[in-house]
Amino acid sequence: MLGFLARRLGINTVLVVLATALSYVVASLVMDPGARFRLQTPPLGPDAIAAKLAAIGADPREPVLSRLGAWARGILWEGNLGRGLAGENITQEIAGRAGTSLRLLVIGSLLAAIVGIGLGVWGAVRQYRLSDQVVGILSYVVFATPTFVLAILLMIAATALNSALGFQFLEFTGEGGEAGQTGLALLGDRIGHLVLPTLVLVLIGAAGYSRVQRSAMLDVLSAEYIRTARAKGLRRTQAIWRHGVRVAIIPMSTFLAYSLGTLIAGSAAIEIVFSWNGVGRYLVSSIGQGDINAIAGGTAFVSVVLLIAASLSDVLFGLLDPRVRGAR
C-alpha cells in the first residue's frame, strides 16, 4: 500500500511540474504582456515597456527557456512566484486568495460527492422509475447549462425569495466578513454568503457524479456476489449496502479526484459572478491581461490542489480495494 501511494505521489508530482512549466511556456509564446502598457494613457514607449517587462522577468527579447529557468530558480530557492504586471507579489496574492477559493471548493466538492453518489445509488436501485428519470433529466439540464448562467438563475431566484420574505435572507454579493465582525457574527455572515455559490458547485458536481455512480451501481447489482448474498438470506437492501455500494464506489474514488478539475473551472466562473476574490478570479483576470507570471502561478496553485486531491483519491482507493492494500 505504501509503495503504491509513493509511486502515485511521485507521478503526480512530476505532472504538477510539467503542467506548471508548460503553462509558463505557452503563456510566454501566446500572450502579449506589453499590450497593457501600450494601451494605457499616455502609452509608454518601446524602451520603457521593455524595461518594465525585464524587471518582472517577462522580457520577450529574452529566450523563453531562459526566462523559465530564472522563474523556476526563484520558486526553488526563494519560494517566489515572481511579480505581476501591476507589481504585486504573486506568491502573496495567491496565498491571500487561496483560503477563499478552498473554502468554496472543499465544501462544494464534498457535498457534491455525497449528493451525487447518493443520487446515483438511488437511481440504480430504482432504475427506470419516475425518481430515476427525474434525476436523469435534471442532471442533463445542469450539464447543458453554463456555470455562469446557473449562478445568475440562482441569484434571480434568491432576489425573488428575499423580496417575498421582506428581508435579505440569502446574500450573493461578495464573500462576507465585514470589517469589525468577530465570532458567531463573522461565521454567520460567511455562511450566508457561501450558500448560493456552494449550491451552484454542488449542482455541477452532483450531476456528473450521479451519472457515473448510477452506471457503476447497475453493474454491481447484476454481479454474482449480490445474488449469492441474497441466497444466503440477506434482504435486498442489506445486500446492496453491505456488498454493492462499497464495490461501486471504487471507480468513483478515481473519478472524484480528476473531476475536481471541472469543479475548479466552474468555481472560477462562480467567483466572478458572485464577486469573490479567489484564485480562480485572479487567474482569469491574469489571462485577460496577458500576465505570464500570474498565469503560471495560478496554474501551479490549481495543479497542487489537483495533486492533493489525486493523492487522497489513491488513499481512498486503497482503503476500498483490498488488492491495492496487499500490493508490494
Image (spheres, rainbow, N blue to C red):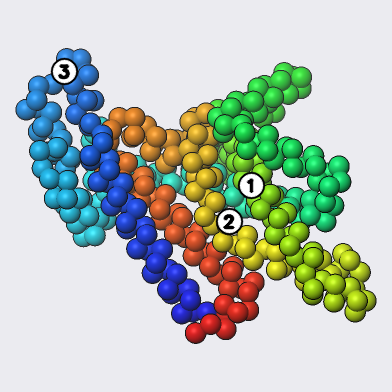
Q: Which mark is residue 208?
A: 1
Q: Are marks 3 and 2 in contact (CB under 8 Å)?
A: no
Q: Residue at x 59, y 68 (%)?
A: 316
Of marks 1 and 2, the one in the foreground: 1
Q: Residue at x 10, y 32 (%)?
A: 50
Amino acid under disc 3: Pro
Q: Residue at x 22, y 25 (%)?
A: 35
Q: Which mark is residue 256?
A: 2
Q: Which residue is mark 3?
A: 43
The earlier-in-sequence mark between 3 and 2 is 3
Q: Element at badge 3?
A: loop
The foreground one among 229 and 165 is 229
26 versus 270 height, above or below: below
Of marks 1 and 3, the one in the foreground: 1
In screen coordinates, is 12 left or right of 261?
left
Q: Residues within 10 Å of mark 2 (few under 14, many from 20)?
A: many
In the orientation shown, which residue stands out farthest toward the left?
47
Q: Quadrant of residue 226?
A: bottom right
Q: Residues within 10 Å of mark 1 (few under 14, many from 20)?
A: many
